[in-house]
Amino acid sequence: MIQLYQPLNFMGMVYREIKQAVIDIEMMFSILQRDAEIKDKPNAPALQAGKGAVRFENVVFSYEPARPILKGVSFDVPAGHTVAIVGPSGAGKSTISRLLFRFYDVSSGRILIDNQDIRDVTQVSLRSAIGMVPQDTVLFNDTLRYNIRYGRWDATDAEVEEAARLAQIDAFIRLSPKGYETEVGERGLKLSGGEKQRVAIARTILKAPPILVLDEATSALDSHTEKEIQDALDRVSRGRTTLVIAHRLSTIVHADEIIVLESGRIAERGTHHQLLARNGLYASMWNRQREAQEAREKLAQAGEDD
Ligand code: ATP
């Protein structure tokens, strides 16, 4: 009985923790995904974040010892540049963003930000240097203003509204029943995936971190929403070191480098045009997505013609 009770009790505890933490994905991650063993070194200094150059050096990682997920991954995101990680489902793309946040430590190799090993600095300073626009943003049960201000608590109302404008969510907010004071979340206004993502972008604009991690939603958004979000993301990533975990290749055509991950290894890397010319995995993913897009457009067109 006690054997049954313990896991149930633990699950109950986790459930309560999750419920209490219906907040931001960063917090969700810290409860669900973070390795309890990750601790700051005694007297660890704060990260001296400059322009936020990111380096993965021969990173090997597994969640469970028997199943390696990353098998020696090396790449640089030079300060201010954009690197996109693409590849089949389960290749290890999101794992790369979790390791950069140090929700887990690498098994071997290292991750550097501005030449500092992320294991040597405090987690608080590390996370304050990175802005995350996650796949699915979880909102506070509070007002829209509060949810955006979460990016930086001392932001003025004018700054919150400017961030919302840049994130292309200001017009939507002004049309909501009580504008910025509209309650959202469980008991309030329900936002669509695209609207929530724009709230996350507004938060990140307020936070203004040197490094951005964009974890693109797997689910397709309608093309108008997608374009608005893409414009907002392009604006927020300009001049920042940006790592994009991409599912739709159309969004990363202009990345400085595209890394194609396959079963935890880098299979190909280069610019969009270099990778198309190579005619390998990236080119076949690109062709498949383009065909699917064309089929969707034909269907939509047929629907309009009816
Ligand atoms: P997708 O495109 O589907 O989001 P991905 O390339 O981002 O996939 P990851 O989320 O990095 O893939 O996962 C890589 C592998 O690690 C998957 O096989 C997944 O099942 C496994 N994995 C992810 N999180 C954990 C975890 N917490 N414990 C054990 N295995 C995990």
Image: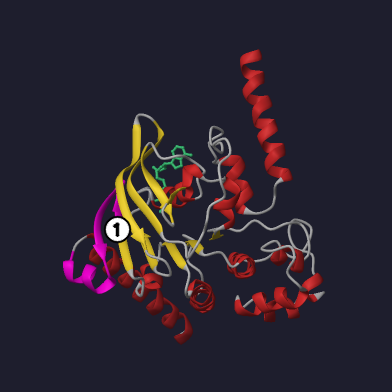
Q: Is 199 rendered above or below residue 46?
A: below
Displayed quadrant of residue 139: bottom right
Residue 117 placed where, x, y %? 44, 47
Asked whether 261 falls inside the magenta stretch, the response is yes
Asked whether 33 falls inside the magenta stretch, the response is no
Are there few (<14), some (14-19), or many (20+) residues within 10 Å of tag 1? many
Report the residue at 64% width, 66% height from top: 203
Residue type (three-letter) at the residue carrying disc 1: Val
Image side of residue 53 versus residue 180, left or right: left
Q: Is mark 1 on a helix, strand or loop?
A: strand
Indicate the quadrant containing the N terminus: top left, top right, bottom left or bottom right: top right
Q: Is 133 rendered above or below residue 237?
A: above
> Residue under circle 1?
260
The residue lying furthest to the left in this view is 278
Which region is colored magenta?
260-279
Residue 198 placed where, x, y %? 60, 70
Can residue 86 be seen here? The reply is no
The residue lying furthest to the top in this view is 1
Report the residue at 75% width, 69% height from top: 145
In depth, the one of 45 and 146 nearer the eye is 45
The residue lying furthest to the bottom in this view is 305
Give the number of marks: 1
Residue 270 placed where, x, y %? 25, 66
Displayed quadrant of residue 128: bottom right
